[in-house]
Amino acid sequence: MAISCIGQTLHICTPLLESVPMSRRTGFKVFLKCDNLQPTGSFKIRGIGNICQKVMKKGGNHVITSSVGNSGISLAYAAKQLGMTATIVIPEVTSESVADNMRELNANVIRHGKVCDNAIAYATQFAKENEGIIYFHPFDNPGIWEGYATVIKEVKDQVQQKPDVVLTCVGGGGLLCGVIEGLQSVGWTDVPVIAMETRGADSYNQAVHAGKLVTLPDITSLAKCLGALTVCQKSLDWGKLHPIHSVVVEDKHAIQACLSFLDDHRMLVELSCGAALAGIYEDIIPKLQKNGKLKDNIESAVVIVCGGAAMTLQALLDCKTSVGIE
């Protein structure tokens, strides 16, 4: 299932594990699709690797994109593996340690703007002004969605029966588009998706309620990797063709989910991933069932553990302190 190019594998087929603690908590089987175990620490390599392959096949050798963290790390990794040059534009919210991780993989790093949307605009213009550099959008991109769809194709081969629901986080909407594209491709067209966000980075939820794209004035959530001011149009369009339930939790719920997940499985993940995990730890599924949005007899759920390479134990403890969790 892994994407490969000239003999080099860019992403791995990650384990699908049943979480005994989470299954005990919910009363149904909870499966974890552990993309936190990718070589780059997140699911992003699936889409980024796919894009780099496409560029390389067309003769390109220098790519540029924008990233808060994980996309950039994945691009730097993919480019190094394939012998390409990578330039990554990061906003102010990206830590210097994450920027250093990109540089250690030989990427050119440019810091510009407050949030990812500012970095996207700069990267787009930079490519226009520098011949031979190919720009690609980090989440509003069919090649990205195609790569992310492989996560569901792997799940199809790993489970004994179709899950009743899939939980994922939403930032710019790229992963959501990929998950749904994957569900459609394997024939699971009736499997609902719970799209989890944190308040202050909830551009998808606001778009769903408005019935059109909404641009947030700023990202106020601590989950900066969910920090797209505007989601891609395709993520909104999918809601007309596939069952999606948009749910927003507070930062403290995402942080507590990360802490609980660390206790349950000894795995450290970012707050964006914590948002998806909060779908289990905050009993979101029973709440949706009570409101008639999900069927009563849930037997299994799959959580996309998207990972995140930027989180450290100290950073998680700092987040815990900042929201007053004891």
Image (cartoon, rainbow, N blue to C red):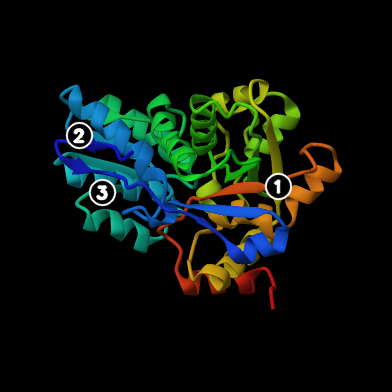
**Total numbered circles:** 3
Placement of 25 over or under 140, stated as above or below: below
The quadrant of the picture occupied by the N terminus is top left
Placement of 241 over or under 178, stated as above or below: above
Residue position marked by numbered label 2 in the rendering: 62
Q: Please indicate whether residue 286 sits to the left or right of residue 140 in the image.
A: right
The quadrant of the picture occupied by the C terminus is bottom right
Q: Residue furthest bottom?
A: 326
Q: Earlier in the sequence, mark 2 or mark 1?
A: 2
Q: Position of residue 243 (x, y in %)?
A: 68, 29
Q: Nearer the viewer, mark 3 or mark 2?
A: 3
Tag 2 and tag 1, C-beta contact below 8 Å: no
Q: Is residue 319 visible?
A: no
Q: Is residue 236 visible?
A: yes
User: Which residue sits at x=31%, y=33%?
Assistant: 50
Q: Position of residue 82 (x, y in %)?
A: 17, 40
Q: Earlier in the sequence, mark 3 or mark 2?
A: 2
Residue position marked by numbered label 1 in the rendering: 248
Circle 3 — which element? helix
Q: Position of residue 263 (x, y in %)?
A: 57, 73
Q: CA distance from mark 3 to mark 2?
A: 13 Å
Q: Position of residue 194 (x, y in %)?
A: 66, 41
Q: Amino acid at mark 3?
A: Tyr
Q: Amino acid at mark 1?
A: Val
- The disc label shown at residue 77, or none: 3
Circle 2 — which element? strand
In which quarter of the view is residue 264 placed? bottom right
User: Which residue sits at x=50%, y=69%?
Assistant: 315
Decide: few, some or many residues near mark 2? Use Cα within 10 Å; few <14, some 14-19, many ≥20. Answer: many
Circle 1 — which element? strand
Q: Please indicate whether residue 297 sits to the left or right of residue 146 in the image.
A: right
